[in-house]
Amino acid sequence: MTDNLLQDRAAGALMGAFIGDALGLGPHWYYDLGEMRRDYGGWIDGYTDPQPGRYHHGMKAGQLSQAGFILALLTRSLVDCGGYEEADFCRRMDEDLFPQLDGTPVCGPGLYTSQSIREAWRRRVEQKLPWGQTGGHADTTEAIERTLALAIRYASQPSRLAAAITANTILTQTDATVVSMTVAFGAVLGMLVRGHALDTGLSSKLMGLVKSGELPFHAVTGNNLQPPRPGDPDPPRAGLFASPDALLTPSYMAAAAIDPDIVIEPGWKVSLVYGMPCAIYHQLPAAYYLGARFGSDFEAAVLHALNGGGQNQARAILTGALVGAQVGLSGIPKRFVDGLQEAQDLSALAEALAATV
């Protein structure tokens, strides 16, 4: 792969996430699809203002939510420091985000603060706890929504990718399963930035990184998930995630996307199949499915993620990153970039991060 193509994919992944975030700002968290259709029509095809009385009311079409704000904050830290420096990221959270919060949901950048960030704010600001004692038990994708920048930065260094994402995730979310699924998403995104396809063979490649010790997942099976043989040693467990299952999910979703006997039509109904709620175990299968099915069509991918309702903002962020990495920044329709507020600054940030990959 040429450096130019690698950087195009890296920039596409980050811009895809920003675009997904901004697309979700208006129709965020509609669990009644009929209500969403009444407010926005039968098909949402771009940026929209939030409706009165809804999440993010007062924001304007094309603006980022707080998830996008934090993603940009971490990305700027990576660019300015030349890599992940936890102390710098935490300082930026202390200085740039937390003073804008008050512990309630409807406050701060984007006019909504998610559970894990509210909990971290309470521990850090109200209880005066040090970073490292700030993580809670939210079972959401909030860590993925920022650590995807780490996945891009360390796409070619899987072990550093896993270590950085783990360290950053536990600042706000400490559930071991959530952490492992967050790291797994980062490993998938890193592979896509490097030029691998989100297909039925991707999980085998990820398992190869487990076997080589580059990804910290516990696994006893052999190649192609064959059973261990008598006398095979038990792999060391220290520091390992309990199982590699989070790395296997992407290829199963890719298989579902191409299986003629599995029909999800239209594609947005993936939200009904895997679930509309916020939890990570609903979000990841849907994003992987959309990322595999629409891997060469950024517009279709993010709009189907968006039109599925529920936690469609997170679904669009994750899907946008996955497909942005596959098509590259050059493959993202210009209207999605132009429609972002602060598009020039965000594009420059994406290109600056891509230059470090």
Image (cartoon, helix red, strand yellow):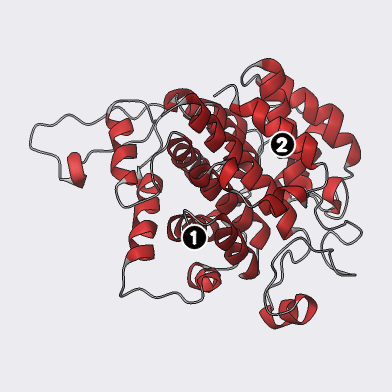
Residue position marked by numbered label 2 in the rendering:
347
C-alpha span from label 1 to label 2: 24 Å
Q: At which x and y percent is residue 342?
A: 82, 41
Q: Residue at x 79, y 26 (%)?
A: 92
Q: Residue 294 versus residue 244: which sits nearer the camera?
A: 294
**SS at mark 1?**
helix
Q: Residue at x 58, y 31 (%)?
A: 150
Give yes or no for contact between labels 1 and 2 (Cβ–Cβ under 8 Å): no
Mark 2 residue type: Ser
Q: Is residue 64 left or right of residue 188?
A: right
Q: Quadrant of the C terminus?
A: top right
Q: Residue at x 53, y 33 (%)?
A: 151
Q: Quadrant of residue 316?
A: bottom right
Q: At which x and y percent is residue 8?
A: 55, 35
Q: Residue furthest left?
A: 230
Relative height, residue 135 to residue 252 (above, below): above
Q: At which x and y percent is residue 293?
A: 44, 61
Mark 1 residue type: Leu
Q: Is residue 130 visible?
A: no
Relative height, residue 334 to residue 26 (above, below): above
Q: Residues within 10 Å of mark 2 (few under 14, many from 20)?
A: many
**SS at mark 2?**
helix
Relative height, residue 281 to residue 225 (above, below): below
* Residue 290 marker: 1
Q: Residues within 10 Å of mark 1 (few under 14, many from 20)?
A: many
Residue depth check, mark 1 versus mark 2: number of the one nearer the observer: 2
Q: At which x and y percent is residue 104?
A: 86, 51
Q: Quadrant of the N terminus?
A: top left
Q: How many marks?
A: 2
Q: Residue at x 62, y 59 (%)?
A: 278
Q: Residue 168 versus residue 349: which sits nearer the camera?
A: 349
